[in-house]
Image (spheres, rainbow, N blue to C red):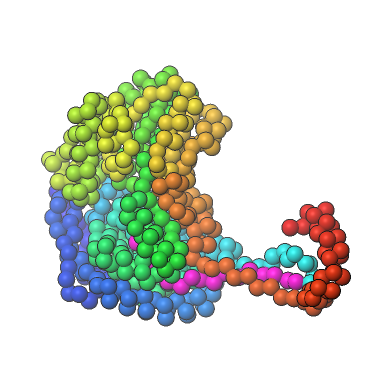
Amino acid sequence: MPASPLSPSFIAAAHRDVSATTGTTVPVTLPFTGEVLHELPRSSTEDVQDAYSRSRLAQLAWARAGFAHRRRVLLRAHDLLLDRAALLQDAVQSETGKTRGQAFEEVFQAAGVTRFNALAARGALRGGRRHSALPLVVTTRVRYRPKGVAGVITPWNYPLSLAAMDVVAALAAGCGVVQKADDQGALSILALRRAFIDAGVPAELWAVVTGEGGIIGAAVTEEADYVCFTGSTATGRRVAVQAARNLTGVSLELGGKNPLIVLDDVGPARAAADAANACFSAMGQLCVSIERIYVQRGVAAEFLREFGRVTGGLRLGAGFDHSADVGSLTSPAQLDRVRAHVEDAVAKGATIEAGGRARPDLGPFFFEPTVLTGVTAAMDCFAAETFGPVVAVSVFDTEQEAILAANDSEFGLNASVFAGSARRGLRLAGAIEAGSVNVNEGYRGSFSSVAAPMGGLKQSGLGRRNGPEGLLRFVDAITISRATGLIQLPRTGREFEALTRPMLLLARVLKTLRRR
């Protein structure tokens, strides 16, 4: 079994970057072996409050520095992320158990997010003139003011990508950040943060705290001027309720039970290979990965045969190289949940078409990518998110049947359509109830399109990250209007009487001119 390539000096430096004074630590394991990777310092609620105080002071200067300065700093950080790609991949693999390639996707995503926000912030947030109801009489402008310090709560599964999508947008908008890192992703987040600090982001501006979610996470939410949370729907509801008590805005990316529709005009072999990636990348521990496949009857038999073959042929492995196609689950809790869902489904009549077994011979948390058929509503994996390498395949006859099945969920985060005809695929995509829909790709098309918004419908969340919408989360819109004095606006009854007819005429003229 491979040991982590992270050096003791790297880990010690990362520990010094945590805002933690309690003197207590928690062991964090290396998923590939189950051995202790490091002892992570724990923060207190006082550490959180102190982090907010320091960040608020730093944020005032950061906001005043302006877009051009922030752009230069963030673009330097972008380059440092690329220079440190190998180190960042080592950190991600050591904490999550991903393959080398899947860890690289995180580095590439974090760099893309950084580049977009650095270059787009000024255009999205510079404000400007708006039409007034009385041209020449009143002028109106909108300006955007940074909210202050954002509280960001980040899970373990995609520590670089998910941190960057919230933190970098906040920094680009002129905000500070206090981030609560999950224990199992803290080293990756601290390595990400260090690149930004070395690029010129003030250390106090972006603080990282650690600890139990119910204590530290609550403190992060309580003190924040805006909250970004990524995690389960149940926890997201609690975060939203707490934030609402202070009338604090939130963006929540929550759970998913993401469907894939395979139409009968596809090539089954290619569709099967693409579906395997959509389902089993990062061992399915991704909020936008596919857990339900609906395949049209005309290609169902051949697709299922190919899908089982591809899935069974995936190389499972632990290694800090490109020798494996899929890696390990991240924790005992993840292994227990996956095993429980598979055992429950089989006990209630489902059939295992591929996989279905834990692989302790490879490592403590390995589980074979698993394909199930015959899944019914009585089974736990039917509607609940597994968040692991388990997918249920069902057969449909008509497009309407597939759309109804795909939309029959409390979740609406991501979906996919595989089609031979682009027009047909896009038509079905428009009927699916999800915040992102991919055609002929599982999730990477929308996930990597950082210029476009990402988020969920229904119980999959609130708000959007990425794109201009992701930047606008972190600012308040301020409207400033000025009376020019060209005409005195009416104040008394007589003045209203004199101006009523001219103003009615003006309204008609503006409508004719299509003036908003």
Check if residue 156 falls in the magenta segment: no
* Camera-nearest residue between 66 and 135: 135
Q: Residue at x 39, y 76 (%)?
A: 55
Could you say where residue 71 lies in the image, as x and y percent from the top left? 51, 68
Q: Residue at x 44, y 48 (%)?
A: 456
Q: Quick check: 45 above or below 183? A: below
**Looking at this rendering, what residue extends furthest in the front direction?**
493
Q: Residue at x 54, y 29 (%)?
A: 424
Q: Residue at x 50, y 75 (%)?
A: 63
Question: Could you tell me what secondary structure mostly forms the magenta stretch?
Answer: strand
State which quadrant residue 380 falls in: top left
Left or right of 75, for residue 128:
right
Left or right of 71, for residue 352:
left
* Camera-nearest residue between 460 and 203: 460
Q: Quick check: 458 above or below 116? A: above
Q: Which residues are magenta?
A: 138-153
Could you say where residue 219 lies in the image, as x and y percent from the top left? 31, 69
Check if residue 146 falls in the magenta segment: yes
Q: Quick check: 461 above or below 257? A: below
Q: Quick check: 484 above or below 113? A: below
State which quadrant residue 422 falls in: top right
